[in-house]
Image (cartoon, helix red, strand yellow):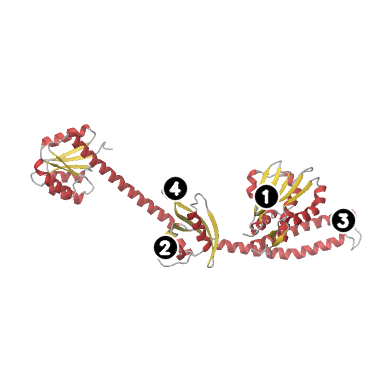
Amino acid sequence: MNKGAKVLVVDDEKVVRDGCHRVLSKRGYEVYTAESGEKALEMLKEKDVDVILLDLKMPGMSGEEVLEIINKKYPDIPVIIITGHGTIDTAVECMKRGAYDFITKPFQIDQFILTISRAVEKRELEKQAQKNLYDLSLEKSRLKTIINCMANGVMVTNKNLEVVLHNPALMKMMEIEEELESPIPIERIINDDSLIGILRKILEENIKDEFFYLELKIKNRYIRTISASALGPEDMVVGTVTVLEDITDFKRLDEMKTDFINMVVHELRSPLSAIRQMNTVLVEGLAGPLNEKQRDLINRQISRIDELLNLINDLLDVAKIEAGKYVQHFVPTDICEIINNIISLMQEKAKQQGVELIFVCENKEPVPADPDSIKEVFSNLISNAINYSLDGGKVEVTVKGLKEYVEIKVSDTGIGIPKDEVPKIFDKFYRVKDPKARHVKGTGLGLYIVKNIIDAHKGSIDVESEVGKGTTFRILLPIATR
């Protein structure tokens, strides 16, 4: 640490100056000398010095006077007083006025070097501390600038759920015009039980490396929040960080899109139903006899119209789901009875495709559910399992109780789903991209509807699949509402 440190020796005795220069230079110090106080002050204007050795008894300006000026102009430079035995009391008095230490003549080399080494170390530590403070101040300023320039709101709380850092975007989002001094109780900014509950959970359970997402409606705004823990020393949770995004415009745009789709599908369903009915009249010969070719063409039209009607019905279901009106009536429901009825209706379809359809029920507990929507879930899953199974395949449906849940599995030995596609299967309009599945008709909305129905029942659905071996959908439905 001492290598290259700069020492200024101020003494009117040449022998002392030369002796100090010789001893210190050998140990890597850079040494400057001055024979008077006036000379020393001139040198300090031009040179950056780490330690000053200052003699008290000098002609002209005394050591005490020089010390006083140095303390005012260069307070960070340690000053070591050089004194004779007769001036120790004066040296001690100088230390009270700001000198770092004193050494007596004649010098004991070891003590002399140790004193200077400590002074240099003190100087280096102070320099490092100043640099750290500057870096900290710069980093804090940079962080504040970044946070204040963010379009999204930022809110940082301590362990007492007091807001200790926030930005202008948050205040604008919350329509708060007054200046708030930190720390602020969180309720003064966002008084939402669901968000506060998540933040309290993060703190109480010491949750790290996990993000919590929430969508709030505050006044006339829709706000999406992402919350996580703020970590301190030793990786301890010391608070929370929440980023808030105003998604009101996106919500309104989505509502406009939904309203438009609803209008279109309602306007399309009636004329399409009428066209289908007229085609049915023609196929049944009620408007006169048809030859084989005419009958085939009209049957194809009916098939295409049915596909459009299925798409329209799916779009209407999606609109109901997004409006929160799809699943409404919860009653004790026998899941096994519903699935058994579906399988009875689909046995003929499975037989035509050479697929073995198996059903095993090991549960007698009713489930609080909306029967119509649950029927749609399993109609969709079982139909898909049959459609995507190759000739000679097998579809197996099992139901069994697991304490607080009923577990339903729908497994097939079909074409399977690629691993990278599995996370997308519950997205709107997703279709399996496989040449073997081209014959399967559908809208790509079925699994999206299934997922939302299960979510509305406070259940869960996951999938395991392997290409060429098959797919298993696993559903858990709570036996009692939670």
Q: Which circle, 2 or 1, is nearer the viewer? A: 1
Q: CA distance from mark 1 to mark 3?
A: 43 Å
Q: Position of residue 46 (x, y in %)?
A: 20, 44
> Dot 3 corresponds to which residue?
295
Q: Residues within 10 Å of mark 3 (few under 14, many from 20)?
A: some
Q: Position of residue 2 (x, y in %)?
A: 26, 37
Q: Secondary structure at mark 1?
A: strand
> Dot 1 corresponds to which residue?
474
Q: Secondary structure at mark 3?
A: helix
Determine whether, in the image, residue 319 is placed left or right of residue 109.
Answer: right
Q: Amino acid at mark 4?
A: Asp
N-terminal of the pair, mark 1 or mark 3, is: 3
> Dot 4 corresponds to which residue?
235
Q: Amino acid at mark 1?
A: Arg
Q: Amino acid at mark 2?
A: Ile
N-terminal of the pair, mark 2 or mark 1, is: 2
> Dot 2 corresponds to which residue?
184
Q: Is residue 82 above or below residue 199?
A: above
Q: Which residue is rendered at x = 31% and y = 45% of the image?
A: 128
Determine whether, in the image, residue 260 is placed left or right of residue 92.
Answer: right
Q: Is residue 459 above or below residue 110?
A: below
- Closer to the camera in the image, 416 or 298: 416
Residue 4, by quadrant, is: top left
Q: CA distance from mark 3 to mark 4?
A: 75 Å
Can residue 57 be seen in this snapshot? no
Marks 1 and 3 close (CB-CB < 8 Å):
no
Q: Secondary structure at mark 4?
A: helix
Q: Which circle, 1 or 3, is nearer the viewer? A: 1
